[in-house]
Image: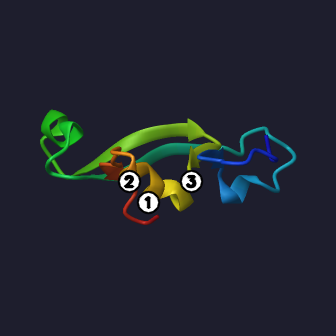
Amino acid sequence: DENVEYPVINLMEDQKEVTDMGGTMRLGAWDCQLEKDSKAYHAYEKELISERHRHRYEFNSDFKEQIEAAGMKATGVNPKT
């Protein structure tokens, strides 16, 4: 919903002008930097992993401070974003 008041999960910026949806989503492997004290780090036993993606939506980092203030933490992020 483009009129939602709090777009915590939002359409990726490079997808907002796409009208032909065929073959335009984020595909393939993307790097993910894990924090050492996270459960994901302990599962993978490394700081940098590669995860496959197939989507058009992502976490809106404009809400990162609010999410962390509420006690949640993003422990895996793409190092280029």
Nearer to the camera, 78 or 66: 66
Per the rendering, the mark at residue 33 is none
Q: Is residue 67 left or right of residue 48?
A: right
Q: CA distance from mark 3 to mark 2?
A: 15 Å
Q: CA distance from mark 2 to mark 1?
A: 6 Å
Q: Residue at x 66, y 48 (%)?
A: 6
What residue occupies the far bottom of the structure in this picture?
A: 80
Q: Earlier in the sequence, mark 1 or mark 3?
A: 3
Q: To which residue does mark 3 refer?
A: 60
Q: Residue at x 71, y 45 (%)?
A: 24
| Residue 74: image location, x then y, percent | 35, 49
Nearer to the camera, 65 or 43: 65
Q: Is residue 34 left or right of residue 16?
A: left
User: What is the quadrant of the N terminus in the image?
Assistant: top right
| In the image, residue 54 above or below residue 6 | above
Q: Give the secondary structure at mark 3.
A: loop
Nearer to the camera, 3 or 78: 3
What residue occupies the far front of the structure in this picture?
A: 70
Q: What colour scheme was applied to this rendering of the protein?
A: rainbow
Q: Earlier in the sequence, mark 3 or mark 2?
A: 3
Per the rendering, the mark at residue 69 is 2
Quarter holding residue 79: bottom left
Q: Is residue 10 left or right of residue 44?
A: right
| Residue 14: image location, x then y, percent | 69, 59
Q: Give the secondary structure at mark 1.
A: helix
Q: CA distance from mark 1 to mark 3?
A: 11 Å
| Residue 72: image location, x then y, percent | 35, 44
Instruction: Say what amino acid the circle numbered 3 marks.
Output: Asn
Q: To which residue does mark 1 refer?
A: 65
Instruction: Say what amino acid the circle numbered 1 marks.
Output: Glu
Disc 2 crowd rating (10 Å Cα; few below 14, some 14-19, many 20+) is few
